[in-house]
Image (cartoon, helix red, strand yellow):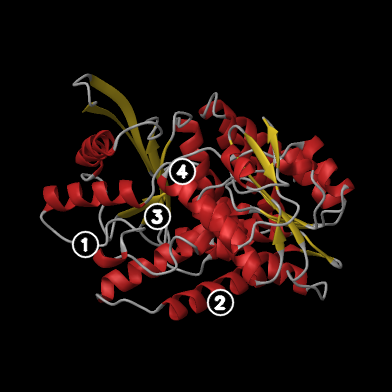
Amino acid sequence: MQKRAEEFMQEVIRKNPGEAEFHQAVREVVEAVMDHYGANPKYVKARVLERMTEPERVIMFRVPWLNDKGEVMINRGYRIEMSSAIGPYKGGLRFHPTVTLGILKFLAFEQVFKNSLTTLPMGGGKGGSDFDPKGKSDNEVMKFCQSFMTELSRHIGPDTDVPAGDIGVGGREIGYMFGQYKRLRNEFTGVLTGKGLNWGGSLIRPEATGYGCVYFVQEMLKTRGEGIKGKVCIVSGSGNVAQYTVEKVNQLKGKCVTLSDSNGTIYDPEGINEEKLAYVMELKNEKRGRISEYAKKYKGTKYLAGKRPWGIKCNIAFPSATQNEINEADAKELVKNGCYAIGEGANMPTTPEGIEVFQKAKILYAPGKAANAGGVATSGLEMSQNSERLSWTKEEVEERLHNIMISIHNSCVKYGKEGKYVNYAKGANIAGFVKVAGAMIDQGLV
């Protein structure tokens, strides 16, 4: 089957040249599911895998807007509608200078399997722009979002494609885009998730990815008779996912000692408690500051300029920043320093070589498509509330989220057991694949 997987990958690479992240995401799935795929002639006959790796639709458009100086600016907008086999396309919008077609195809492909794992009826998609909100005024962000949505509105809808936020797209951006959609379409619908609580948003949505990731790691630890309490955790990133990962670890009596951004890492051996976390949230969400300012405020904190946190001793690591932030050397350092559980809050933050290190060491490794599915799961719950014109309590939403993460963990165990060891990456890929593949076969050649 290895030969067959390699032949398949060569064709994917030929058809999608220069898209390294997309190749990486596809390879991970193909290598995990190929034995299962080959053992089911119905999948092979229907060429399910070939169809899964081809987006149903790719939308690319220009986004012209005026900055505060009255100058004309041009960015590029995208929406990758990857799979609608089990529901409307669902996935975030990313505004960041590094956004390319290949990056978004990788994210959309991952999203298909992640959404499948949630047990909710959602297909997979992803979109965004190379626009950078950093350093822009609210007025400039509004003008860009309105121009972006003017084109995107033609392609989305509550029963077609329901985007959400991602890197660079928070409550402010979702609000501006929703307002423009409503203005253009003259309808108030659940076309976006991550909305404000007073106009259709769901409680727990901002917390969901971080909370869900911690819940998943908690389930993994239970297989070894352990819990989060007393564990030293390192977290990368300092945005939404990282912030709420720290909050939930604190609630479960663990201790997070790091956060980072693109400039460097802070290491606070005393732990990032509730008061310090509130400071980080204000610094990052309102002041748009740099994490280095934390080290100036809190004595005893070290600032590691230009570095990531992977050299710091810990029990659990939560990579929550961006793709490929843990390489082989980082993974070896983590294992050497006693880390025995990884919960990926970001999408594909570990390189294939790094994953191999974790799996050879038989540590608990939760891939992003399983561990960080809590965000999109709660987006799905927001869609349900919008459809019913209801609003659930915080406790109701969090209980549903917790149960979904337990269900995802159980699916990974079911398909990933290798003797006494659970290969969570393999389990997540097969579990996600089986549901989508079955739907594709049921619906015929579309």
Q: Earlier in the sequence, mark 2 or mark 1?
A: 1
Q: Is residue 76 left or right of residue 211?
A: left
The CA distance from mark 1 to mark 3 is 15 Å
Q: Which residue matches tag 4?
A: 167
The numbered dot on residue 403 is 2
Task: Name the residue rendered at 47%, 41% in the picture.
Answer: 54
The residue depicted at 48 percent of the width and 39 percent of the height is 289
Side of 98 relative to 93 (left or right): right
List the residue tagged with mark 1.
189
Query: How many numbered marks does the figure carry?
Result: 4
82 vs 431: above or below: above
Pick the residue in front: 60 or 210.
210
Confirm or deny contact between disc 1 and disc 3 (CB under 8 A).
no
Amino acid identity at mark 3 = Lys
Residue depicted at x 72% and y 42%: 309
What is the x, y in percent for residue 159?
A: 28, 60
Q: Say which quarter of the image contains residue 392.
A: bottom left
